[in-house]
Image (tube, rainbow, N blue to C red):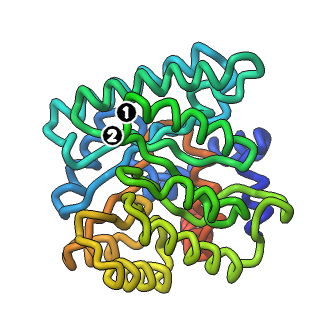
Amino acid sequence: MRGALLGMSRSSTIKNVVTRAPVTRGVVTRFVAGDSTADAVEATRALAADDLRVTIDHLGEDTTDRGQAARVAVAYVELLGALHTAGLSDRAEVSVKLSALGQYLPQGGEDLALENARTICQAAANAGTTVTLDAEDHTTTDSTLGVLAELRRDFPDTGAVLQAYLRRTEEDCAALAVAGSRVRLCKGAYQEHESVAFSDPHAVDLSYVRCLRVLIDGPGYPMVASHDPRLIAIAADLVTRAGRSRDSYEFQMLYGVRPAEQVRLARLGHTVRIYLPYGDDWYGYLVRRLAERPANLAFFARSLVGRR
């Protein structure tokens, strides 16, 4: 089922059917803040009231048009300005997919993505906050890490995202576990071949813990992105054993997934950051969320039945 859903995430035919179905909107609003910058700012304000931090994703990916890539960069600049005006820059940063900034263009895509990312990083610096580069499928990993290295020359707070299901990730963690390096570790949400990624859930969990140990034992800033109670408990134990202070790491969770747990962890004194997507290009994001957890798929199914 997970493989089928991940295959759907890049099917334009299925996308057209799903996005036109009236029932879908009720599901989307659980996981997506809304369509506009104002929606993202208001959702951020509500999360901040519960002592939660936020990282905001302007939805969109796989851009192959220079004009669209530029518009995405402008949307982020507008968002960062709005967060600053609302006094929320100390609670929120942004997450950026390089493929939305032109990385996939056949000629000069990586340079274009770097240029657009620089624009966003400068806007974030002006607003007093940071940027994290999202991970995508394995074919973009080397390019994304290369752009990260370039950005960190001028914007050293730029965050990285690594996916534990990729076989290479433990080595990438070791390379990025350096002083001042913000690294989000997640399980991974793309359909990958067995040659490059672990497919067995238990193997993915074991890889996650190995990677987590590398990050927590290093001098960087680990960002533990998981909803799995076992992994959260393991991470909490590892940071305690490592003698880490509460401001030297954070937990991250998705908007709309286990919201009570998000608040519980924050009330225990942990820094908790919520990945908050907004925008009308939500299809690929939503399908990957449904694929990640059976509970998400069950929620979607109940919504379909309830609207009939």
| Residue 308 in view, yes or no | no
Q: Report helix, strand or loop for mark 2.
A: loop
- Other residues around mark 2 within 10 Å, as few (<14) / some (14–19) / many (≥20): many
Kind of residue sitting beneath label 1: Phe
As displayed, is residue 14 above or below residue 53? above
Quarter that holds the N terminus: bottom right
Say whether residue 47 is left or right of residue 303: left
Q: Are marks 2 and 1 in contact (CB under 8 Å)?
A: yes
Residue under label 1 = 155
Task: Residue 128: give x, y in percent of width and height.
Answer: 22, 35
Mark number, residue 177: none
Report the front residue among 87 and 244.
244
Secondary structure at badge 1 equals loop
Q: Residue at x 19, y 64 (%)?
A: 50
Query: Going by the image, does 237 lie left or right of 31?
Result: left
Q: Nearer the viewer, residue 30 or 291?
A: 291
In the displayed structure image, the side of residue 180 where residue 162 appears, left or right:
right
- Measuring from the top left, give residue 191's x and y in whole percent: 76, 57
Task: Choose between 257 and 34: the one closer to the eye.
Answer: 257
Q: Is residue 91 above or below residue 191?
A: above
Q: Quadrant of the C terminus?
A: bottom right
Which residue is under mark 2? 130
Q: Judge depth for marks 2 and 1 and give the one in front.
A: 1
Earlier residue among tags 2 and 1: 2
CA gap, disc 2 and disc 1: 8 Å
